[in-house]
Image (tube, rainbow, N blue to C red):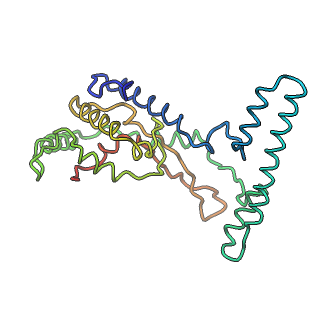
Amino acid sequence: MERLLPPDTPDIERTYQDFCESLLSAAKQCIPRGRRKNYVSCWDKECETLYSSFTRAPMGIASDRAASSLLSQLQQKKQERWEEAVNAIDFSHSSRKAWKTISKLTGRSRRSSCACPVSVNSIASQLVKNGAHKTGDREPTRLVNKEMSDLWKIPTPEGHSISEPFRPEEFAAAHRRLKPGKYPGLDSIFPEFILHAGSALKSWFCDFLNSCMGQLKITKIWRRALVVAIPKVCVDQEKGYGNPKRISFLSGFSFPLRLEPCGP
């Protein structure tokens, strides 16, 4: 937290970018062992000891023996894990789980690959056309802006104004409504980063939101969404795929601004 810029820095773009970089750097250092790119299956403390002996051994016969011992140990561990997985297959309770294990062991996949007849460029072009609206009457926009301006000044039942800074209990209430397992936005911030954050990070981010409200600005990346088009299969097989279903992924850290004001 000491490396972060103050949350009330006027340049909110630079502040949020520095915040995301620091958060992602800390997250990469805490990646579970099974998710790392240099993960080696069946690697344990004994393999670590053999690998240390291999690195310390002089080049020649000694290093070859250490390397052979390490490879033999890994092969033995993999064989034991294979036998354990095969012996654990049981069709008496759950055949679905058993067939899933067999598919993993054999590398067999039941899903048949079917190419989508609609190109990616055509889907993107259609999405852009759907989002382009002609400029019409400005009167509804002016009415909405006026209502928002009046609502901004109306006090809440608790006696607080909507334009007042976020309170810790309001931030905690919005935090409890955040759902895990969601895809991140363009800032690559997963909801789990927020759910498992410490009190210091939550306090810093609450102050940053208050700074954004005070300046009447939000970061540009919060206004953008990552849109993924998923083709829907038609009932009529001759038509192939139907119209794509659009899914938008927003930034996870903009969740307090996308919730209505709520109490603790």
Residue 180 is situated, as x and y percent measured from the top left of the image, at 44, 51
Q: Quadrant of residue 209?
A: top left
- Which residue is rendered at x = 73% and y = 66% of the image? 88
Q: Is residue 147 left or right of residue 176?
A: left
Residue 168 is situated, as x and y percent measured from the top left of the image, at 24, 44
Q: Nearer the viewer, residue 220 or 131?
A: 220
Count of numbered badges drawn on the protein = 0
Residue 56 is situated, as x and y percent measured from the top left of the image, at 77, 26
Above or below 112: residue 221: above
Q: Quadrant of residue 36?
A: top right
Above or below 199: residue 56: above
Q: Nearer the viewer, residue 64 or 166?
A: 64
- Which residue is rendered at x = 27% and y = 30% of the image? 217
Above or below 159: residue 20: above
Q: Is residue 134 left or right of residue 240?
A: left
Q: Nearer the viewer, residue 19 or 241?
A: 19
Figure quadrant of the N terminus? top left
- Which residue is rendered at x = 45% and y = 46% of the image? 192
Residue 97 is situated, as x and y percent measured from the top left of the image, at 67, 67
Q: Nearer the viewer, residue 34 or 7?
A: 34
Instruction: State the residue lying farthest toward the bottom.
Output: 92
- Which residue is rendered at x = 55% and y = 40% of the image? 31
